[in-house]
Image (cartoon, helix red, strand yellow):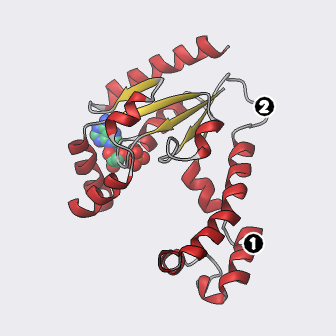
Amino acid sequence: MIVGLTGGIGSGKSTVVRLFGDLDVHWVDADDVAREVVEPGTPALEAIARHFGEDVLLADGSLNRAWLRERVFAEPDERVWLETLLHPIIRKELIRQLHPRDYHLPYVLLVSPLLLETDQRDLVNKILVVDVPESVQIERTMARDNNSRELVESIMAAQMARADRCSQADAIIDNNCPLVEVERQVAELHNRFLLEFS
Ligand code: ADP
């Protein structure tokens, strides 16, 4: 079974998934995978360099994300080209990493901020949402990333609304509480999943 773990920016996805990890649950972060597939030496990065030219690479041969972001922002066709290249590669790699060898638990986790907005949704059997009020999301993200309130609010505006996200959840973790209580919720859910999926 694959459980998808999602939530808005700063809701606590990384925090919660690490707590599951402490219980030996295997997890895959969709953002990490999206970065891994364009690391130096990968076929995807070679294709990107062939298409955009050497400008898309930094001096050390890694991807110049800022340059690429501006380029695809200015040219929608280039965005389509890039997404057409990367989408199947990321999806294949997600599926590969979601099936570890020699794994003894009946479920794994896929962490993704865009789980419900993309076709990553059909990779998972259950949806687990990490939930906090918007005001907490804003405060915690501002503190973590040193970003302005305006920037955090604009990122949130582009994400699914809290109520919509929660209405699609099979389970919700309330992260508007001290970490010990989050740990308790995680342990409870873990036991529930073990029973449900074995
Ligand atoms: P996400 O991965 O969803 O963007 P994070 O797990 O990075 O969110 O959490 C956002 C910030 O809030 C981090 O700095 C994290 O340490 C902090 N945080 C998460 N959960 C709690 C909590 N229950 N109490 C206090 N701070 C928290």
Number of other residues with Cα within 10 Å of mark 1, as a class: few under 14, some 14 to 19, many 20 or more? few
Q: Is residue 178 above or below residue 146?
A: above
For image coordinates 29% across by 36% down, the residue present is 132
Disc 2: which residue: 102
Name the image quarter holding the C terminus. top right
Number of other residues with Cα within 10 Å of mark 2, as a class: few under 14, some 14 to 19, many 20 or more? few
Q: Taking the image as drawn, is residue 169 in sight?
A: yes
In the picture, the disc for residue 41 is 1
For image coordinates 34% across by 57% down, the residue present is 155
Q: Could you tell me which secondary element the residue under label 1 belongs to?
A: loop
Pick the residue in front: 93 or 165: 165
Q: Is mark 1 within 8 Å of ligand 1?
A: no
For image coordinates 61% across by 68% down, the residue present is 80
Question: In the image, what residue type sits under mark 2?
Answer: Asp
Question: In the image, what residue type sits under mark 1?
Answer: Gly
x%, y% of residue 126? Answer: 56, 27
Q: Is residue 177 left or right of residue 87?
A: left
For image coordinates 62% across by 28% down, the residue present is 125
Q: Quadrant of ligand 1?
A: top left
x%, y% of residue 144? Answer: 31, 55
